[in-house]
C-alpha cells in the first residue's frame, strides 16, 4: 500500500477531504489519489484492493477508517456502503470496483496531468 509521504508529517491532511490535503498529496507525485473509505474488518474492501492491485503504480491509495473519531462524518455518510471510493476527492463508486469506470476516470486524470506538464 502506498500513502502520500506527507501523511506522517500531517496526519490530519491524510484523512482530510479538503482540497488542500488532496493537492499536497497529488502534487508530490502527480498521481491521482484514490481514497478508500473502509473499516475493520471489511472483506469487500480487501477484495476491492485485490482487484485494483494491477493499477497500483498509477495512483496513490489513501485509506480512511470511518470508525475513527475524527472520521465520524464519513461514518455517518458511508456506514452501510463501504467500500466507497473517491478519486481526487470526488465520489467514484461504492460496494464493488467498477473496473471500466475506474479505468476511464484514471485515464482521464492521467491525460489531464500530461497536458499540464
Image (tube, rainbow, N blue to C red):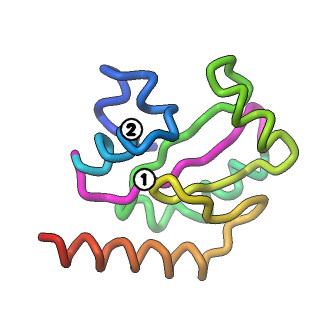
The answer to which image quadrant residue 28 occupies is: top left
Rendering coords of residue 89 (x, y %):
50, 53
Q: Residue furthest right?
A: 80
Q: Which residues are magenta?
A: 28-42
Which residue is more in the foreground, 17 or 102? 17
State which quadrant residue 91 falls in: bottom right
The image shows residue 85 at horizontal and vertical percentages of 62, 55
**Residue 85, above or below 114:** above
- Reading the chain from its start, which is encountered first: label 1 or label 2? 2
**Relative image position of residue 38 (x, y in whole percent):** 69, 40
Tell me if residue 88 comes above or below residue 104 in the rendering.
above
Crowd band around label 1 with a 10 angstrom C-alpha radius: few (<14), some (14–19), many (20+)? many
Secondary structure of residue under mark 2: helix
Q: Of the numbered discs in the image, which one, if any, rests on residue 33?
A: 1
Dots 1 and 2: beta carbons under 8 Å? Answer: no
Q: Residue at x 35, y 22 (%)?
A: 10
Say whether residue 39 is magenta. Answer: yes
- Residue at image position (29%, 40%) is 24
**x%, y% of residue 55?**
45, 66
Hey, which residue is sitting farthest front in the picture?
Answer: 19
Q: Does 14 appear in magenta?
A: no
Amino acid at each position: 500500500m502506498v500513502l502520500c509521504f506527507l501523511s506522517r508529517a500531517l496526519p490530519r491532511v491524510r484523512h482530510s477531504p479538503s482540497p488542500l490535503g488532496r493537492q499536497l498529496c497529488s502534487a508530490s507525485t502527480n498521481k491521482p489519489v484514490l481514497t478508500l473509505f473502509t473499516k475493520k474488518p471489511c472483506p469487500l474492501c480487501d477484495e476491492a484492493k485485490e482487484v485494483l492491485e494491477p493499477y497500483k503504480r498509477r495512483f496513490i491509495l489513501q485509506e480512511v477508517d470511518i470508525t475513527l473519531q475524527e472520521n465520524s462524518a464519513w461514518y455517518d455518510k458511508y456506514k452501510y456502503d463501504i467500500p466507497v471510493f473517491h478519486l481526487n476527492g470526488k465520489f467514484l463508486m461504492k460496494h464493488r470496483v467498477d473496473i471500466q469506470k475506474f479505468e476511464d476516470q484514471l485515464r482521464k486524470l492521467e491525460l489531464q496531468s500530461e497536458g499540464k506538464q
